Amino acid sequence: MAFKLFNFLKIGKKKKNKKSEEVPLDVNQSMQFVNNPYQFYQKDIQVYSDISYILQALNSKIDALSAKIDNISLRLNNLEQMIYNMLYRR
């Protein structure tokens, strides 16, 4: 938390991965952060929530695909057993 506060208080800091102009922070913004840091993390919390939702959806899709693969594997094993029975049980 102290590290984030230190980075937040740097004046004229550029954001990584974005081409933006430097925006100097004033004392009022710094005091708002100290008094209520939650408002500055609301965007991060929303992003984490969205990522969590996407990961849950992907996990359910993976589970469905896994069930289909298991079903196909079972059918192939049954087919293999039928072919074996037809060829060698005369």
Image (cartoon, helix red, strand yellow):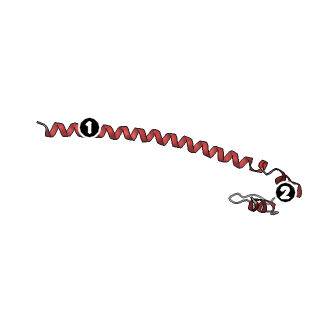
- 7 left or right of 70 in image: right
Residue type (three-letter) at the residue carrying disc 2: Ser
Residue 41 percent location from the top left of the image: 74, 50
Residue plotted at (23% across, 39% down)? 81
Residue type (three-letter) at the residue carrying disc 1: Leu
Q: Choose top left, top right, bottom left or bottom right for residue 86.
A: top left
- 54 left or right of 38 in image: left
Viewer-proximal residue among 1 and 6: 1
Viewer-proximal residue among 14 and 37: 37
Q: Earlier in the sequence, mark 2 or mark 1?
A: 2
* Residue found farthest to the left: 90
Label 2 secondary element: helix
Residue 32 percent location from the top left of the image: 85, 52
* Cα–Cα gap, marks 2 and 1: 70 Å
Residue 20 percent location from the top left of the image: 75, 57
Q: Which mark is residue 13?
A: none
Residue 59 percent location from the top left of the image: 52, 43
Label pair 2/1, CB-CB below 8 angstroms: no
Q: Is residue 86 above or below residue 45?
A: above
Label 2 crowd bin: few (<14), some (14–19), many (20+), radius 10 Å:
some
Q: Which residue is mark 1?
A: 79
Q: Which residue is mark 2?
A: 30
Residue plotted at (77% across, 49% down)? 38
Quarter of the image with the C terminus in it: top left
Q: Choose top left, top right, bottom left or bottom right for residue 29.
A: bottom right
Quarter of the image with the N terminus in it: bottom right
Label 1 secondary element: helix
Label 1 crowd bin: few (<14), some (14–19), many (20+), radius 10 Å:
few
